[in-house]
Amino acid sequence: MSIQTSRFALRGFVALLLLSALLLAAGVAGAAVTAQNPPPTPVDVFCVTGSVFDHAEKPSSGWTITAVMYDPTTGLLDPGTAVDAETINVDNDPAGPLGSFRFNGLAAGVWNFSIGTRTGWSPITPASFDVTLAYGRTDCAAIRFKMRQDVTVTVIKINTDHTPLSNWVIHAKPGVGNFFAQAKDATTDSSGSATFTLTPGQWTFSESAPVGVSAVPISPETGSQSFTVEAPGPYTIRFKNRVLEQPKGCIEAIKTDSPPQGAGVGLGGWSISVLRADNSIAAEGKTDAFGRIVFKDLPLGPYTVHEKLPATDWEAAAPAHYAVTLTDAACVTVEFANRQVEPAFCIVGRKVDTNGLVGLPGWEITAQPQAVGGYEPGPVYTDGLGYFRFDFPMNDYRIPSAEYNICETITDGWLAHTPTCQKVKLPTTPGACVALGFNFENQQVGHAESQKGVPPAGCSATHTVKWGESLYGIGRQYGKSAQEMLNANQWVRGQKNMYLYVGQQVCIP
């Protein structure tokens, strides 16, 4: 080979190297351009994918889903746009997973999607809803339907004579592994039947007797039974019991007006209450237009029946409560009689011995008007329980709103333990008596001061009455029954309407 030929070969080899370098650089640059500028993503995708699940969150097949477009002009569904898709092995997605469906080739607009009906199934989610497909979508819209499979279970309730039992509550509770179900209750009807609509799975059924009814289970012996509910059903199960009859009694209360002469007339709208032995309320209500009320279906045992007197205008003409013991189904009748009284202006109070706070009889109490020329009543004297009362005339203009100084007269051998006077103002209109703010209290000369407040014999404690308190209400504070309180405080019977007044001392048995 000549030198010239060698030069041409060398030049060709160099040119080839340069060309290879240029091609390689161009390829790298092209790759870089491709990485920096990916191909454009398609827009305006109008398709819908979806699925159908059952109540247990499992895919469900065999459903028909229909899509219908709304006419943008009329706003109504356009039947001509209806498209169906089945939830498995659909023509446009034969490889889709169980319970899935897909709609391709839809148009922009508002579409209604609905799921077809099947016997024994009901929707959990709405069976029909709208979806808007707008321009600019880059992927399919996703929707879902959830359906519940319903199985009917009927529970029959009978007694040993196979007589249907009504008003029994049957409980259906999901069993082991039945995670997606909720407990249900149903009450047996006149035919003794209670019907449930349940989902497949393990269930336990039990029963509850009506209030006041006792029963012994016969079948099933445990009073409950469990089994697996499977579609399509239906199922019928039975509960059989021996019912133990519990007799009930009743109390009839009659409320009458007691006129000066002649027969009484019923008083309607008066409150009557029936208390158990523990002083809790067993029943209460108001008398009808004829002054009667009947409390039915009371369990046998002891009760106390009470009337509630209004604050003014009436006083008891007979006992305000009765002790009643129900021993059978017969109705026991009690009668309350009341007498209407005219409202009055009056002042009441009490005088007590510091030793045990027992009432002091025969003490003189005076009422002095604070206004010049005011009406001045004569002195009054405490009764055997230490109570006193001033009554004022109704036809004297000086009485309404008058203020009086009520004073005790000190007796030899006694020392005042409280102020000997206290002021009282009468109301502008007649009504309930005005009570003193505190009891007049005296201590016998030589009596030890330490004895103040010692409960009298037979009392565990004494209670000073506050505004708004009643004898039975005070008893409830100490856990004592109404009868116990009345037995320990017989003096209350001697008070008008058996009222308590502020400052009085009540014996707690």
Image (cartoon, helix red, strand yellow):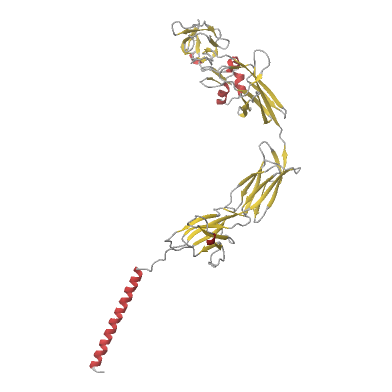
- Vertical comparison of 440 with 69: above or below: above
- Looking at this view, name the residue that lies furthest to the bottom: 1
Judged left or right of residue 205, residue 409 is left
How many numbered marks have been drawn onto this rendered protein structure?
0
Residue 3 picture quarter: bottom left
Residue 269 percent location from the top left of the image = 61, 24
Image quarter for residue 17? bottom left
Using residue 191 as the reference point, say whether residue 17 is left or right of it: left
Q: Is residue 129 above or below residue 246?
A: below
Can residue 420 be seen at all in this image of the molecule? no
Percent across and percent down for residue 362 are: 55, 7
Query: Residue at position x 30%, y 81% from top?
Result: 20
Can you see residue 50?
A: yes
> In this orientation, which residue lies closer to the viewer: 178 or 403?
403
> Which quadrant, please, contains the C terminus?
top right
Q: Position of residue 215 (x, y in %)?
A: 70, 40
Residue at far front of view: 73
The residue depicted at 53 percent of the width and 60 percent of the height is 67
505 or 499, nearer to the observer: 499
Q: Nearer the viewer, residue 81 or 236?
A: 81
Closer to the camera in the image, 53 or 101: 101
Question: Residue reaching furthest right?
Answer: 161
Kindly give the residue lying farthest to the left in the view shown.
Answer: 3
Q: Where is residue 147 shown, x and y percent of the image?
A: 57, 55
Placement of the N terminus among the 4 image quadrants: bottom left
